[in-house]
Amino acid sequence: MLNSTLDQARKGNPITILKLPSGDIKSQLIRLGISEGDTLICIERLPGGTIVVQKNRQQIALGFDLAKKINIILQ
Amino acid sequence: MKFDNILKLDSDKITSSLLVEEETNSTQKVVLVGNPNVGKSCIFNYMSGMYVDVSNFPGTTVSITKSNYKGKDVFDTPGIYGVGSFNDEEKVARDIILSADVILNVVNALNLDRDLFLTLQLIDMGKKVSVLLNFSDELKKRKIKIDTQKLSELLGVEVYETAAVDKIGFDKIGEAIEKARTGKQELDLHFILQQVMAKSIPQCDSLLILEGDESIAQKHNITNGTANEREKIYIGRRNRVNEIIDVVEHEDSKKGEIFNLFGRYSLNPKTGIPILFVMLVIVYFFIGDIVSQRIVNFTENKIGKEFFEYNAKSFVGDFTPVDIDVVVHDNNGNPVNQRLFKFPSGINSNTQLKNEFELFSKQAGAQSDFHFSNPIAKLFFGEFGVVTMTVTYLLFLLLPLVIGFYFVMAMLEDSGYLPRLATMLDRSFNKIGLNGRAVIPIMLGFGCITMANITTRLLGSEREKSIVTAILQFVIPCSAQLAVIAALLSGAGFGPMILYVSVIFTVLITLSTILNKMLPGESSPLLIDLPMIGFPRMRNVLKKTFFRSFGFMKEASFWFFIGALAVGLMDISGILQVWQNLLAPFTTNWLKLPKEAANAFVMGMVRRDFGAAGLFHMSLTVMQKTVAIITITLFVPCIAAFVVMLKERGWKEGMIIWFGTWITAFLIGGIVAQFVI
Ligand SMILES: Nc1nc2c(ncn2[C@@H]2O[C@H](COP(=O)(O)OP(=O)(O)OP(=O)(O)O)[C@@H](O)[C@H]2O)c(=O)[nH]1
Ligand SMILES: [Mg+2]
């Protein structure tokens, strides 16, 4: 268990969302199904830090600038 | 569980308490609403009998399309994850939702947890809703069970299973509209809503105001909720979704792997770049070899020149003075025999010579050039004849190539690859002030710039839209242009192509880097959901290819005719000479092309791809051709694209871009010419 940001996640890591950045982007993430407290799996981390996570049957790609603003617990 | 906290509202009571001020229009307004990429357009096509694009990436539809279904108005809308105003598509969708009588909420059964958020929001708005649980074919394949009855109970609205690609469940659409009703709303939220509604504001508006929608609040002259309040409502709604999912969804084996390895590999550059490269090579051989050489050779020369033009021209020549120059070539293309036939009063007037001419001109390898002296005959059937050139060029040269390109694009759009390409390229795009999502409009640009200009709406900020719009108009060749390029360079080998690609690419990087530095504001980060990846559905691909090619022909024929007529009239009146001489310093000294190349820029203003029509008739060296196509590529966008750009981006930006393309086209074309010619 380790407090970190999403851009630090590695392929295959299960992660729990601790805190989302505030503002419109937070609302957008909640709509997509990424809320604080959710557990997701990082299925890909591209060179440069673009992150792809999977929640249930859905895969979502997040840019590095967004990923580094999302606080997570690495498991 | 707190389902007991949910109140079933009597729909009669709501309408009476709100008494919608707007006149009830006699025709019912049925609106298809759903998350992106869930099959709304598929269903719309079925209901309306029309064709709107169906593709496998989020954001295919960016504007409203209206049609009718059994006497009701039906609307296709852009996909949204929730009703709000985070971007342009959402605003467009929001307004139509607010005015809807019935909402057909399309949900993707595989991503029910994501999609139900919007469903609950629509229900909270007090709208009459029916849910179409689409992708039910995939449920069976993956052994996922969704208890639709329970779901319907919990939502308080009807739920119908559909599989839009196979037209399954469509017999129930009429019933879905009939039985649409207001669903179960959360009590706490509804209590707060009542306070806003007390000011005689409709429920749907009230909810959006509570969720912080400024423009709706202004319309009713009250203050909107804060971002914090919105979040609270959103989190509450998300929790309700999760509770519903827990009850209705069962998956037999969690192992139902949706995303195949290809999808995985295409994400990471290590494997993704080789995949991209292989795909490009396949496309190169398909277009560059099969279509542009084998097929076009046949259609253009055999059907277009030897059959259509020959017959059309000799028919006209039957009645009007004509000199015909016939050259016979051997198998290697060397002239071996030549004869000039003069018919000062039409071919028909000299039967003996007519027979000789027919015998001579119909032997293998013969090519006939008709020179009419009557100006009208010349205008319509001469070397640049409006009729002959329009038909040969459009139908027998461009069309096969354009079909080829549209086919490739349709395969790409249907495969689910584009969002993955967007993800892979995200970091590189960040360097030019964009995020990976910009891949989508740019790739669509290779199909049609006009369409791509509209698709820029799916980008997150104005500056990104400006950058991508500029890239599209300056550097991206559309399929018609690529067709011309493929035809001009066919058989010239890799060298010119590599030169062409590197010049265009350099301009792209330079242009976007400058814009990124100059434009104020900040770009948005990538946030995109990746759809299933799979082999494209041929029916969809062919249908799309057909409709696009048809649309292309419809528009292009008219404009080509106009352009060819303009050049023809300028030619006859002598203006063309003046224009050629005027541009001569540019064309001959700077671009090092023959001065007739100036004709290309007249046609090019109508449509870039037509510009090259003139080039076909000139004998150019390979490098001259390369310079010409670089210049034409960078030249102004076609009239249709130009008009759409003005509408999307405004006059000022549009005009700057338009004049900018003149300057860059000649500047870059000339610089390249200095080096290679
Ligand atoms: N397997 C399966 N695929 C479907 C079904 N319905 C639609 N699709 C596919 O899903 C993709 C999206 O379909 P569209 O009709 O373009 O979706 P849309 O909701 O209009 O998408 P946007 O316009 O982007 O919001 C296409 O590739 C369809 O072929 C279905 O029931 N089953
Ligand atoms: Mg659509």
Image (cartoon, coloured by chain):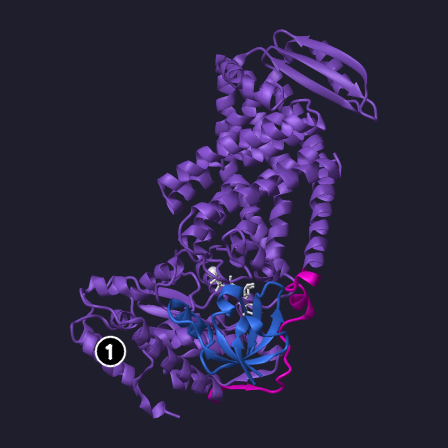
Chain colours: A blue, B purple
Q: Who's the residue at 69% across and 29% down the image?
A: B623
Chain ID for label 1? B
- Is residue B262 inside the magenta stretch? yes
Identify the image quadrant of residue A47: bottom right
Q: In the image, is residue B531 above or below residue B124?
A: above
Point out the image quarter for the N terminus of chain B.
bottom left
Q: In the image, is residue B230 above or below residue B445?
A: below
Who is closer to the viewer here, B387 or B476?
A: B476
- Is residue B58 inside the magenta stretch? no
One can see residue B540 in this view: no
Identify the image quadrant of residue B317: top right
Residue B527, percent from left and from top: 49, 65
Q: Disc count in the image? A: 1
Q: SS for tag 1?
A: helix
Amino acid carrying label 1: it is Leu
Q: In this view, does B574 lie to the left or right of B306?
A: left
Residue B195, percent from left and from top: 19, 78
Identify the image quadrant of residue B676: top right
For label 1, count other residues whose C-alpha is less than 10 Å away and answer few (under 14), some (14-19) or many (20+): many
Residue placed under numbered mark 1 in the picture: B193
Residue B364, percent from left and from top: 80, 25
Residue A11, percent from left and from top: 63, 74
Q: Who's the residue at 83% across and 27% down the image?
A: B331
One can see residue B232 in this view: yes
In magenta, the rendered stretch is B247-272
Who is closer to the viewer here, B444 or B669?
A: B669
Furthest-top residue in this view: B344
Ligand 1 has an atom within 8 Å of the beta carbon of the residue at disc 1: no
Who is closer to the viewer here, B398 or B206?
A: B206
Point out the image quarter for the C terminus of chain B.
top right
Q: Who's the residue at 47% across and 83% down the image?
A: A37
